[in-house]
Image (spheres, rainbow, N blue to C red):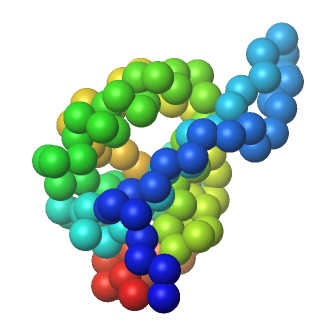
Amino acid sequence: MVQKASFFILTLCFLLAYKSYGQAERDTLFYELETEMIEETRVDSISFEETVEYWINVQLIEKYHAEFAKLTSDNIDNFLAVVYDGEIIAPSLPTIKGKISRGRFPLGSYKKKEKATKVREQILSKDD
């Protein structure tokens, strides 16, 4: 069995070109999330006029804050893809708008609370 290198593996590579309304091409920051890195998660809801969306809020353990802040600072206006167990776990790729210095970020949006809860439970399960 190949042992995972450190608590997270980061790969910066080109995922797709995104052109719309004059926007330039964007790269994607792939952030490998592992159970040991997580201090806390919770499922929150956001209500709109007639719909509700569910988000998983993830809080990293403090020792990962500085590196995550550097990665997000270096990738402003790029997409963020959170990867767990080799798969992108968020249903959409948000754009990084600024440095995330306190290690807290959302995964979402999910149309059903059950799906958000299932993904939350998946990332809280022990890694192999």
Picture coordinates of residue 31 (x, y %)?
48, 50
Q: Is residue 105 visible?
A: yes
Location of the C terminus (image quadrant): bottom left
Q: Residue at x 51, y 22 (%)?
A: 76
Q: Nearer the viewer, residue 1 or 31?
A: 1
On the image, the x and y values in percent for residue 59 come to 25, 53
At 39% across and 57% down in the image, what residue appears? Answer: 8
Whether residue 111 is visible to the viewer of this picture, yes or no, is no
Residue at the farthest left position: 62
Q: Report the front residue among 119 and 67.
A: 67
In which image quadrant can residue 14 be found? top right
Residue 95 in which image quadrant: top right
Q: Which is more toward the observer, 80 or 21?
A: 80
**Image: 106 above or below 67:** below
Q: Is residue 97 left or right of residue 111?
A: left
Question: Which residue is depicted at the point 59% across and 70% down?
Answer: 86
Q: Residue 101, position in %: x, y? A: 25, 31
Residue 20 vertical placement versus 124 (above, below):
above
Q: Position of residue 11 (x, y in %)?
A: 57, 46
- Looking at the image, which residue is at 31% across and 31% down? 69
Q: Quadrant of residue 35?
A: bottom left
